[in-house]
Amino acid sequence: MPYDPSAFPPFAVTVDLVVLTVRRHALCALAVRRGEPPFQGRWALPGGFVRADEDLAQAAARELAEETGLRAHDPSVPAQDNGAHLEQLATYGDPKRDPRMRVVSVAHLALAPDLPAPRAGGDASNARWAPVEELLQQTGYGRDGEPVAPLAFDHAQIVSDGVERARSKIEYSSLATAFCPTEFTVGELRRVYEAVWGVALDPRNFHRKVTGTPGFLVPTGGTTTRQGGRPAQLFRAGGATLLNPPMLRPEV
Amino acid sequence: MPYDPSAFPPFAVTVDLVVLTVRRHALCALAVRRGEPPFQGRWALPGGFVRADEDLAQAAARELAEETGLRAHDPSVPAQDNGAHLEQLATYGDPKRDPRMRVVSVAHLALAPDLPAPRAGGDASNARWAPVEELLQQTGYGRDGEPVAPLAFDHAQIVSDGVERARSKIEYSSLATAFCPTEFTVGELRRVYEAVWGVALDPRNFHRKVTGTPGFLVPTGGTTTRQGGRPAQLFRAGGATLLNPPMLRPEV
DNA sequence: GTGTTTATCGTCAAGCAGACGACTATGATC
DNA sequence: GATCATAGTCGTCTGCTTGACGATAAACAC
């Protein structure tokens, strides 16, 4: 039976990105300002159409590079540095999610270390790192007193799902190191967990846990006093990806 | 700026279903035989095009009902019975995954209790429950001596991802009860875990764990001797969905 | 030097998991 | 009906992990 275009409705397929980082002890997501309707002037997630010859992961990596300059970490090259973690999150396809046409969006989750200022086509005023609580509250006022409008489309739901994925995934994997630079201290890693979970962790028990888990951290030999106080050992992420037993998230 | 159809390439969007059940102590997935090219005569996952006015979850629930007669369990109605668990799995969009055209498939995972014979439009010879190891081995011979051909398209990858999701999810959630009938014994639940994980579990420790986790199981008062031996208490699934601490999967 | 900050090591008790003994209640077999 | 096999249920013990927290170490600010 030959290909019959009338047999199925045509869709537009996009990728949207939840790019998370930890800045100033807060979990932040990258938001870009929409330059055209619908939702003109509102904040939204970066994203764009999947091209005709592109895989979904390729499209997500391309959008990530365009918006942040980050290369996506290729899981098949374990020793690669400076690449952001990128994984598929979920797919959103409500018929009414875009008023113009039928759009299915394959959302991806990226975790990146703290970066210099974001860029959106070179225009800094149209991209920012926003604390996720600010993006998720429907109305109110942000830290700078500016009124907060809800994210465009269903992007608040997507951010919420991405944050929840990140929160649960650092429990049982070594993914929290994706938020850290190449070399980092135990204290810096602990502050990542504290920012993502929004809780305080005991420094002594955390130190025992992460240094006692084989393959999680490998010492580089160096030390640093970045945070003040006694110099701390520097580590790199080890080869282990799964934490067993997991890092336990404290009860609320 | 008005809607410009030339600004994006058109896609076909489908849902594919990984329907898992436990039959005769083996984890099985529903497979249907393809009646037309490409891959005519080969086994594939049930699925079909998403309609113009349908949400993705609706499309998946519709396909599930068409192929198995199962209603999807609506998470907003906790007390509902007899509904299969249905959740989005992942989305597959390699440009070459369907030789006819550009198809993006949103795979869903369904977990169902052991059912009567499957039906595919009423034709039983074109649908079957196949042990997942049989579906995942690329070549060889099945249990009945018939030669095994790989699944159509990228469906082997999708089955593999679905099985992995189910294996990990029964660790930290009460989802294993989705494989059981409304009333079941601790031993039946244990055999579900053993089939899904492919391991043997200690009946005494398992019994202590599941009966000691608040909200996991609620006794119905009845007993049964279905499996022979001493009569066992019957339980229903409790309201808890998350298991904390999780059920630990034994090391290989 | 004194105080402050952060890192790191140690101790202790509670809880949980794995290994496994013992007993119970049914059906099957002789 | 006695014996056996099967499956379910209750306990015990030991080792590991965690959470709470004391103590020490090494830097900086004054």
Image (tube, coloured by chain):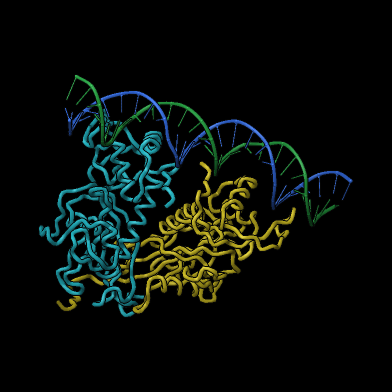
Chain colours: A yellow, B cyan, C blue, D green
* Residue A196 in view here: yes
Q: Position of residue A229 (x, y in %)?
A: 74, 53
**Compared to B120, does B26 lie above or below?**
above
Relative placement, left or right, of B144 versus A105 is left
**Viewer-closest of C26 and A113:** C26
Q: Is residue B67 left or right of residue A21?
A: left
Residue B143 appears at what percent x and percent y? 21, 58
Residue B45 percent coordinates (x, y):
24, 63
- Residue B55 at least partly seen: no
Horizontal placement of A228 versus A40: left or right?
Answer: right
Of B69 and B153, the residue lying toward us: B153
Q: Quadrant of residue A81?
A: bottom right
Answer above or below: position of B49 versus B99: above
| Residue pictured at 24% horizontal, 69% vertical | B152
Residue depicted at 38% across the width and 40% down the height: B202
Residue A86 point in image, percent of width and height:
47, 66
When asked about the image quadrant of residue B158, the answer is bottom left
